[in-house]
Image (spheres, helix red, strand yellow):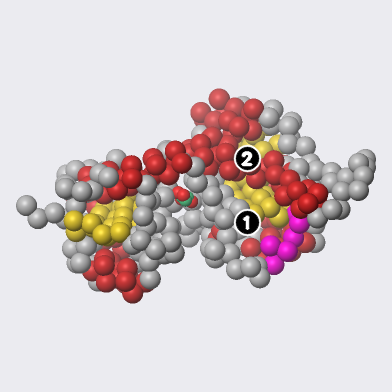
């Protein structure tokens, strides 16, 4: 029996890779950095399946040069790196890895809430650089988290998990979502409002929407100017949801109090990015799902989805069901 040919663009955890022998003829890109575009195009051109990450651009060019491709399994919940419409036109299945990273990502959003509000990174640097010469009533004052207002943009699974954490801090919850979410209103007493209302009333605005044509630049100068001067913007979704230049002005000119960012327009973020020069901006290198358990779950799901698609079964996490011919 000939096994389907699979290209895996990063060495993922064994919980996933160990499922492939005997079911796929696979090759793994072993370097730490992303696979070079030319190599990806060449490998994809002969593959039945791809197991890829958010660093890989799966676009029209790649799809049109990959005549045998049946499944693209993304090792991420977000799939803005993939042209889903182009894949669907060709009947190629696209899958992602939801659920297993929900808690890890909500935890990192809350890490940023606390770190940005209480100036944790700035305080750590202050201490280590020898600037701590006395206790003082005004030393490194932050913003209260407990009892404040959390505004959640995108009440999907991760938004919901953030709301749960916010309730643990006795926060009132506002949310903005395309469709109604009666369960969030019931469970958290959360209130669904317009984006404008959310921006005006929240002490923390946490972004949990996927990146799409609709959400690109969702938070720009106009929106940042609506926020309270004491408010903090948290982004753990995708960098382009926020206009980074406008955010720099908002934080440096103090239209808002600060920001906590796990994601950027360009990743890795160039070191000359102006936001990195600001003390009121706390930054992380896209670590939302970076726990052992979440990544093991993602690897397992990505491999299971890939194999299901290649074996003619409906993958559990199918993004484009129109492509599935059962
Ligand atoms: C995702 O899954 O979309 C995260 O951003 C990366 O783990």
Looking at the picture, tell me which residue is in the foreground, 296 or 183.
296
Looking at the picture, tell me which residue is in the foreground, 117 or 90.
117
The label nearer to you, 1 versus 2, is 2
* Drawn side of residue 51 relative to residue 289, left or right: left
- Residue at the image point whose x is 65% and y is 60% from the top: 220
Residue 213 visible in the snapshot: yes
The answer to which of marks 1 and 2 sits earlier in the sequence is 2
Task: Report which quarter residue 142 is drawn in.
Answer: top right
* Drawn side of residue 106 relative to residue 56, left or right: right
The residue that disc 1 covers is 219
Looking at the picture, tell me which residue is in the foreground, 12 or 276.
12
Mark identifier at residue 110: 2
Please state the horizontal and vertical placement of residue 306, each as a whole percent of the image.
26, 49
- Residue at the image point whose x is 9% and y is 55% from the top: 2
Q: Quadrant of the C terminus?
A: top left
- Residues drawn in magenta: 274-280
Q: Is residue 80 above or below residue 307?
A: below
Q: CA distance from mark 1 to mark 2?
A: 20 Å
Residue 318 visible in the snapshot: no
- Residue at the image point whose x is 16% and y is 48% from the top: 22
- Residue at the image point whose x is 84% and y is 53% from the top: 130
Q: Is residue 277 above or below residue 179?
A: below
Determine whether the residue tagged by mark 2 lies in a helix, strand or loop: helix
Residue that extends furthest to the top in the rendered view of this protein: 186
């Amino acid at each position: 029996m000939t096994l389907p040919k699979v290209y895996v663009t990063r060495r993922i955890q064994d919980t996933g890779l160990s499922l492939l022998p005997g079911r796929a003829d696979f090759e793994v890109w072993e370097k730490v950095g992303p696979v070079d575009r030319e190599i990806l195009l060449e490998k994809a051109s002969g593959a039945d399946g791809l197991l890829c990450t958010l660093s890989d651009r799966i676009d029209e060019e790649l799809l049109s040069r990959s005549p045998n491709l049946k499944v693209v399994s993304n090792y991420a919940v977000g799939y803005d790196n993939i042209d889903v419409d182009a894949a669907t036109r060709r009947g190629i299945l696209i899958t992602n890895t939801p659920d297993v990273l929900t808690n890890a990502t909500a935890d990192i959003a809350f890490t940023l809430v606390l770190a940005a509000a209480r100036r944790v990174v700035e305080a750590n640097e202050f201490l280590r650089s020898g600037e701590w010469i006395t206790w003082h009533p005004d030393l490194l004052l932050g913003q209260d988290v407990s009892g404040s207002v959390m505004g959640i943009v995108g009440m999907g699974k991760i938004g919901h998990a953030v709301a749960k954490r916010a309730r643990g801090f006795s926060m009132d919850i506002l949310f903005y979502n395309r469709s109604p979410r009666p369960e969030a209103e019931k469970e958290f007493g959360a209130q669904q409002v317009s984006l404008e209302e959310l921006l005006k009333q929240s002490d923390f605005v946490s972004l949990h929407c996927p990146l799409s044509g609709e959400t690109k630049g969702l938070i720009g100068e106009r929106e940042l100017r609506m926020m309270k001067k004491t408010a903090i913007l948290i982004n753990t979704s995708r960098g382009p949801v926020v206009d980074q230049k406008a955010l720099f002005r908002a934080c440096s000119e103090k239209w808002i109090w600060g920001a906590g960012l796990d994601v950027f327009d360009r990743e890795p973020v160039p070191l000359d990015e102006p936001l990195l020069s600001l003390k009121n901006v706390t930054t992380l290198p896209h670590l939302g799902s970076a726990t052992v358990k979440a990544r093991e779950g993602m690897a397992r799901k990505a491999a299971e989805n890939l194999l299901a698609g290649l074996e003619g079964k409906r993958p559990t996490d199918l993004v484009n069901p129109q492509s599935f011919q059962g």
